Amino acid sequence: MRIPNRLTRTQKSAAVGLAAAAGIAALAGAAPGHSDAHTDRGQAKPVAGHSVNVADHPSTKAAKAATGDHTTDNTRSHAPAKTLVKGEETKQVSAAKPAAKADKTDQSEKAQQAKKAKQAEKAKEARASTKADRTTRGESLDGWIKQARAVMKEEGIPGSHQGIKKNILRESGGDPNAMNDWDINAQKGTPSKGLLQTIQPTFDQYHVKGTKHEVTDPVANIVAACNYAADKYGSMDNVNSAY
């Protein structure tokens, strides 16, 4: 019987399959160092965002069951740290501004309170000083009148303590340096001066020896004025207005 030289379609398909299998075996058994056209392309990169949860792997679950550890999460995927953008940074700075502004407001209020307290203290000291001046002036006035009356007694000049004091308080308020710069005497160039507002010519005329020759000296002014009042009105006690 003669064997045909041609292969059937089935035989051809079987031959192609055997050839392909032989090629794959040859590639798998290639010696180390064998170069391949695809080797130069480098390793394939992992797909971005892909994660593998080791905890769900059968081997991990078996290890947990054996050790009793049921809380460890070995998920390999980690979300990247969030970058602080410019807008968020501005928000944080803005949030810090109210606190700084509040601190400045508190400092301003404290400064104002301290200023008011200082002003109140100064006003208190001024009132105390004024009161002390008035007290000292009153005590000095009585002392000046007493000294003047001692001189007046020797000279025979009349005048009671009360009569002299009431005229002094009306004329100068007890200020030995008081001066009238508006009346007719001032217009003539001889202003009234001292406790009893004596003009210089009158003081010079009625000045009493033993006292200072100064119109603003308290004792000398009292004695000279009382000497004048005794000559014109009989006594300083009789003077109840400008004289």
Image (tube, helix red, strand yellow):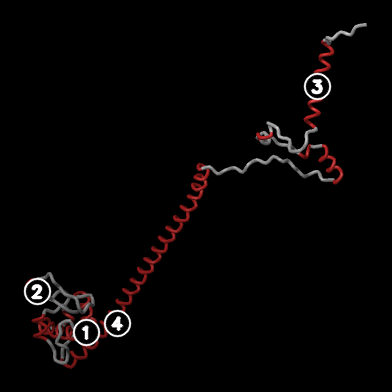
Disc 3 versus disc 2: nearer the observer: 3
Q: Label 4's element?
A: helix
Residue 181 found in image quarter: bottom left
Mark 3 highlights which residue? 19
Task: Work out whether residue 100 can be spotted.
Answer: yes
x and y percent of residue 124 in the render?
37, 70
Which residue in the structure is indicated by mark 4? 139
Q: Which mark is residue 160?
A: 1
| Tag 1 near tag 4, CB within 8 Å | no
Residue flagged by tag 4: what amino acid is it? Answer: Glu
Most distant residue in the bottom direction: 154
> Between marks 3 and 1, how big is the CA–CA gap?
157 Å
The residue sitting at 82% across, 37% down in the picture is 58
Cα gap from disc 4 to disc 2, whole angstroms: 30 Å
Q: Secondary structure at mark 3?
A: helix
Residue found 80% across the figure and 18% down from its top: 16
Q: Secondary structure at mark 2?
A: helix
Nearer the camera: disc 1 or disc 4: 4
Q: Amino acid at mark 1?
A: Ser
Label 2 sits on what residue type? Asn
Q: Quadrant of the C terminus?
A: bottom left
Residue beneath the point at 24% across and 87% down: 146
Q: Quadrant of residue 239?
A: bottom left
Which badge, 1 or 2, is on the more N-terminal residue?
A: 1
Q: Quadrant of the N terminus?
A: top right
Image quarter for residue 223?
Answer: bottom left
- For the residue pair 25 and 97, the one nearer the viewer reads as 25
Numbered badge on residue 185: 2
